[in-house]
Amino acid sequence: MTRTLNIKDALNEALRQEMEADSRIVLMGEDIAGGAGRDDINPDGTDCWGGVFGVTKDLLGQFGRDRVVDTAIAETGFVGAAIGASLVGMRPIVEIMFADFIGTSFDQLLNHAAKLRYMYGGKVSVPIVVRTVTGAGFRAGAEHSQTLYSLYTHVPGLKVVAPSTARDAKGLMLSAIRDPNPVIFMEHKRLYLLDDDVPEEPYTIPFGVARIAREGKDVTIVGVQKMVHTALDAAKLLAEEGIEAEVIDPRTYSPLDEDTILGSVEKTGRLVIVDESHPRCSLPTDISALVADKGFASLRSPIKMVTGPHTPIPFSPPLEDAFIPDAGQIVEAVKSQFEMARS
């Protein structure tokens, strides 16, 4: 049966269903169980926040404090503990409040979780999921608004997932939990309340398979997470002017579905990549290099990137709004490609 859920509730359902099916799964994070020692206030867990955005709300009441564990404000410690637990048969799901804070546990992820399977010749697995929240537009300032997909995509041994719809969020989360390797699962805070049709039964979506969010023949637009929706808005504006854009949602960045991107560019001859993150050493630069290397003969005009500027994300609402790419900028980038072709 399919019903309408938002991304936050779809993730909650995925966690609940998998925890019911597999007793090895434990949740760890700050404030996901209402705070350690708060049994006098919420003995059954029903009034717990469930993390800062409520994704794990009510799971404590069903699974108890042995499986929904509040941690100290010490990401290095509890990410390290989760890695150790995974090596002895547990399947931890760790919540980092904001992607910006994940740097405090980067050594654990970069030098341990990502490398142990390789260093031990495949004799061990590290089935850990690190959930974290990305994105600007929440008036949260420079230290709570970054995306940082590219940092983790750069590290071999880490899988990086960034859903843009509720249906994808549930299916990709179930795939992440079942994966024997470490997964960084990045959830955009401005998408949590976005609705979609979501099957009630458990299902998985494979990593490395992009979604064609809109078919078109004139230009390929690759959107990074929230920018998929901005790209779709731009595609509607372009259609009014007779330009049919194909919009691609990669869904995962490691692994990346190169074939779908290259196949689309072969059809359209043009490529625009949209990302709210900074432009240097980013996903747009990586995808641009991919197409320049493997799909250059298909291009009819130069590749265009639409990104945030190479600055910290402002706290000022007008400046933050100016930082985030909008549909108008995408339309302008696409039109410039056609103008170059005519000149």
Image (spheres, helix red, strand yellow):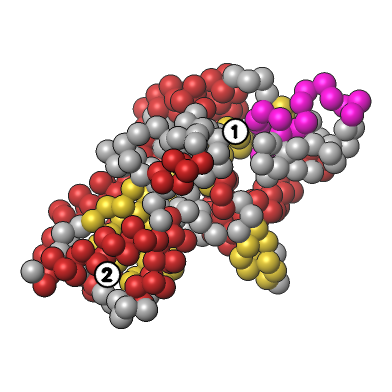
- Report the magenta stretch's main SS: loop
Which residue is identified by label 2? 219
In the picture, measured across the screen, residue 321 lies left or right of residue 153, that is: right
Q: Badge 2: how crowded within 10 Å, few (<14), some, or many (20+)?
A: many
User: Measured along the vertical axis of the image, is residue 284 above or below residue 315?
Assistant: below
Q: Which residues are magenta?
A: 22-41
Kind of element beneath mark 1? loop
Residue 27 is inside the magenta segment:
yes
Which residue is identified by label 1? 97
Residue 203 in sight from this viewpoint: no
Amino acid type shown at disc 1: Met
Residue sitting at x 84%, y 39%:
47
Residue sitting at x 63%, y 20%:
73
Quadrant of image for the C terminus: bottom left
Q: Which mark is residue 137?
A: none
In the picture, measured across the screen, residue 242 lies left or right of residue 194, that is: left
Q: Badge 1: how crowded within 10 Å, few (<14), some, or many (20+)?
A: many
State how far apart marks 1 and 2 are (Cα): 37 Å
